[in-house]
Image (cartoon, helix red, strand yellow):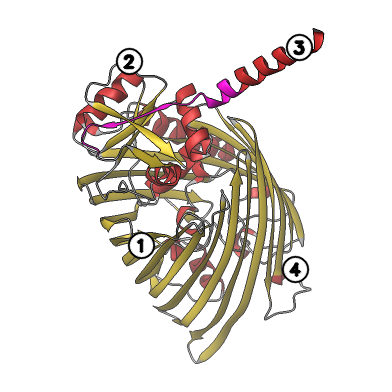
Amino acid sequence: MCKAQCLMLLLASLASWSGASAQDVVLVANKGVKISEITDADLRGIFMGTRTRFADGSHAVPVTLRGGPAHEVFLRNHLSEGPEEFRSQWRKVVFTGQGAMPKTFDSESALIEYVAATPGAIGYVSRISSQVGVKLLTTVK
Amino acid sequence: MSRRIYLLSRHMLLFLFVCTCTRSLYAQDLAGTGIVVHAYVSQGFLFSSNNNYVSLKSSEGSPQWTDAAVNISDSLADNLRVGLQLHMYQLGEFGGSNIQVDWASGDYRVNDHFGIRAGKVKTVWGLFNDSQDIDAVFLWILLPQGSYSTDHKSFYLAHVGGDVYGSLSLGKRAGMLHYVAYAGQATIDLNDGYIQTFAQLGLVFTNSLGGKTYGGDLQWETPVRGLIIGSSGNMLTADGTAPAGSFHSPALYTPSMYASFTRGKVYLAGEYDRIPINATLTLGPTVIPFVADERTWFAMGSYRLRNNLQVGSYYSHFVNKSADTTQPANYSKDWVVSGRYDFNSYFYAKIEGHFLHGTALGYYNSTNPNGLAPNSNMLAAKIGFSF
């Protein structure tokens, strides 16, 4: 009985642990973006400034949150970067004249509004209640 | 003492003034026009146990070290961008109040594989050449001086000409290649350390000197996440005429090989560079050979203790192989420990200790009239602001 209880407890812990690690942001893109899935490599290229186009050749406009848990989860899970490293990389791009920093937003609602209105825009939020003007993207390895 | 307090006050006031002015520019684009403004400013302090470093009176403690830049850019189309960056710096006797165009370019990106950048463009070479004066992106206050000398940077930082650049995917299992190739004209600024070195030899330039430059950089983003391996090469000539004589440096090839690894809170990097110089100075009827075989390498590592706190260390090794490498004047070996604290996304402070052996780099007669001690320890500190 005791063993069974311990096993149940262990399984419950594992389930909650894997649930926590699976917590991810929701990728949103403008409705006009034709792709519905994106590789982590493409996502990293677009958000780190080495790619300006989606896999189908259309122009990509990355946008980010200024900070907060969703921003950190996105950087960690999809770009393998911390917030400081991400900021430093973009400062380097901007101050060497190699590119322009992604537009950043203080709130998720403002980011979704911008993505909905901007062709090629791609961003992320912690959750989404309405998909008006945006589509959800899934990531593939 | 009162002059030092005056200088410190003046530099701090300049720093605070720029910070105050720029706080209102957090907005990313000017009134929704799409024109974007960014800026940085930093104020440094250097104290050394012996010798005066990079023309600062560092043995007394010197704050005469200010850097500031502002840039403005606009995307005229999805694949066409123009921009300009103005830069001013004061490093002891170098730099000054003159504002320079750091870069000014138009950038047309045909696709991710091919783009063209033209105008005054930052020169890509090694790990840090194009970004070496952007203090805000580094943990380090002074980068390894054998490769990225603070007092000689004007010649290497940028060229007037053009770049082609792009990225090529090698497939899921082989990573990506990033390339840059360039050609143009590089100039030694009259406020640069090289000009003072020539003046010490009796050649006082009143017009800036320079020459043609071309080269490239190939960087492999390996399939091992965070591992980058790269190589750069640069050909550079320099010619100049002064009232008392001239300087001529035929094309010299400077190769660089480097690697960096980033994973989570850890950063590791290393680089090997070689600068073989075979120039001549002509002073009246006298021709003086100006020969050196400079070889330098460094290894560095850092660890992020918290989101806003990073520590690290590097060792930098420089020798002039064409001279007696047992003499302190022909080598420079530097052990460095650094720490950086970010108060928020905009303000940061850094502190750094240097344990410097040899006198081959960073010293000038004008600030060391009584000669040099072979070793020196230094404490550097900086505060900075960037948006």
User: The disc numbered 2 marks a residue on which chain?
Assistant: A
In this view, B241 is above or below B340: below
Residue assigned mark 1: B165
> Residue at the spot x=29%, y=21% of the render?
A110
Residue assigned mark 3: A4
The quadrant of the picture occupied by the N terminus of chain B is top right
- Mark 3 and mark 1, same subunit? no
Residue farthest along the right direction in this orientation: A2
- Residue B75 appears at what percent x and percent y? 22, 45
Graded by Cα atoms within 10 Å as few (under 14), some (14 to 19) or many (20 or more), the crowding at tag 1 reads some
Q: In the image, what residue type sits under mark 3?
A: Ala
Residue segment shown in magenta: A18-33
Q: In the image, what residue type sits under mark 1?
A: Tyr
Q: Nearer the viewer, residue B198 or B165?
A: B165
Residue assigned mark 4: B328
> Residue at the spot x=58%, y=40% of the render?
B4
Q: In the image, what residue type sits under mark 2?
A: Ser
Label 2 to label 4: alpha-carbon separation: 68 Å
